[in-house]
Amino acid sequence: MNAAELTVISIRLLADRNIDSRIKSLFETGRIFEYKNHFTKAMDIEGFMPEMSYEVTPCPPCWDMLAIHEFDDAIVGEDGEWQHAVSFLPIFLIDGGVLVITLDSSELAIGYFSESDWDNESEGFDRGVLSLWSSLEAFLNSLASTPGGSVEEENISTLHVGDEVWSEG
């Protein structure tokens, strides 16, 4: 699928949701697809991820669609165990999980969700999501078309996701 087709799907998924206009604009304009195959800055989070740069891939802004292809609906689905899913919107898949927008944050903070941590209450976690960036704009501005800095080649995590993640079954 091309970005225009994915944009149409995104608009349909967000149409009936009361979501911040900045998020809707990101999908409606297709801007989110400009970041496909971009990389996060190297992340050094003690005890969680090695210092790595992760490739991001836009994903459907809908947990139910991700539950069909990527995640367990018993955790992230409408009746899933993770009751806080409604407070977070998935936007980018990365190796091992998904980057999400915190919907009840005025700055639209960005965090990392992994099914294995949905009930994690450790320092740095907010309702099962590891807090990484203070705002959506700070996160988008940090993405680069190539892994940056002194990231070693073995510390670059790429992700190969097909268009099936965008299909409804």
Image: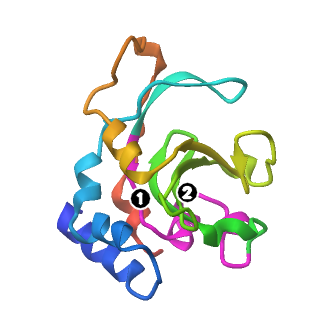
Vertical comparison of 116 with 108: above or below: above
Q: Which residues are magenta?
A: 56-79
Residue 81, by quadrant, is bottom right
Residue 83's disc number: none
Question: Is 75 or 151 nearer to us in this picture?
Answer: 151
The answer to if 98 sits in the magenta stretch is no
Q: Amino acid at mark 1?
A: Cys
All told, the count of numbered labels is: 2
Vertical comparison of 12 with 27: above or below: below
Residue 2 at least partly seen: no
Residue at x 30%, y 40% (from the top left corner): 37
Check whether the beta carbons of the residues at disc 1 and disc 2 lie within 8 A of each other: yes
Residue 46 at least partly seen: yes
Q: What element does badge 2 sit on? A: loop
Residue 66 drawn at (x, y percent): 53, 64
Residue at x 25%, y 33% (from the top left corner): 145
Sooner in the amino-acid sequence: mark 1 or mark 2: 1
Residue 131 drawn at (x, y percent): 61, 45
Question: Is 102 or 153 nearer to us in this picture?
Answer: 102
Q: Amino acid at mark 2?
A: Glu
Residue at x 48%, y 18% (from the top left corner): 155
Which residue is under mark 1?
59
Vertical comparison of 53 with 133: above or below: above
Residue 70's disc number: 2
Residue 11 drawn at (x, y percent): 32, 78
Q: What element does badge 1 sit on? A: loop
